[in-house]
């Protein structure tokens, strides 16, 4: 740990994973394992498609290559996604955007 309370990863670890030393990451824990995630730029847009069903049959649509059946997102999953979005804070650069309620 450095003086700024950050974790310093060994140089050989970074090199093996092609990670720049100045890159910032955050740690997540899943099933007892630590996962290193890169800090990505602020989220500005999110497209949420609650269904893969479409009756248009457009020849150029990517869905024509899918082998999965058409399905609808459950309301429980949709609400969980929206709840997660509402827990995020807006970046300072997005102060001109409508409130989160508008997103829903």
Image (spheres, rainbow, N blue to C red):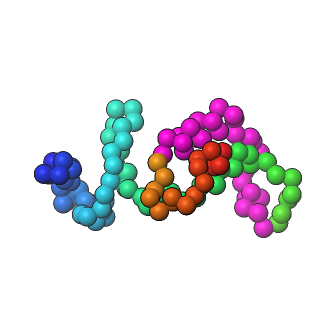
Where is residue 36 drawn, in percent x and y?
Answer: 34, 49
Out of 15 and 49, give the one closest to the viewer.
Answer: 49
Rendering quarter of residue 71? top right
Give me the residue at 72% from left, 61% from top.
Answer: 62
User: Residue 77 in magenta?
Assistant: yes
Left or right, 17 with respect to 45, comes to: left
**Residue at the outermost left position:** 3
The image position of residue 22, as x and y in percent, is: 25, 64
Q: Count the numbered circles shown.
A: 0
| Most foreground residue, 58 or 93 | 93
User: Is 5 a magenta residue?
Assistant: no
> Residue 100: image x %, image y %?
58, 47
Q: Is residue 68 above or below residue 80?
A: below
Q: Does the image show residue 88? A: yes
> Residue visible at 74% across and 46% down?
51
Outermost residue on the bottom side: it is: 60
Q: Residue at the spot x=13%, y=51% of the render?
A: 3
Rendered location of residue 99, percent (x, y): 59, 49
* Stretch of the chain drawn in magenta: 60-88
When the figure is inspected, residue 97 is found, relative to residue 51, above or below; the finding is below
Q: Is residue 69 visible?
A: no
Q: Quadrant of residue 50?
A: top right
Q: Residue at x 24, y 63 (%)?
A: 21
């Amino acid at each position: 740990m450095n003086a700024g309370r950050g974790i310093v990863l060994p140089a050989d670890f970074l090199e093996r994973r092609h990670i720049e030393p100045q890159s910032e990451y955050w740690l997540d824990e899943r099933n007892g394992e630590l996962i290193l995630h890169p800090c990505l730029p602020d989220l500005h847009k999110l497209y949420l498609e609650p269904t893969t069903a479409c009756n248009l049959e457009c020849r150029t649509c990517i869905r024509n290559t899918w082998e999965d059946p058409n399905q609808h997102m459950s309301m429980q999953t949709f609400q969980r996604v929206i709840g997660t979005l509402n827990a995020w804070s807006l970046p300072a650069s997005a102060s001109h955007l409508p409130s989160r309620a508008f997103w829903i």
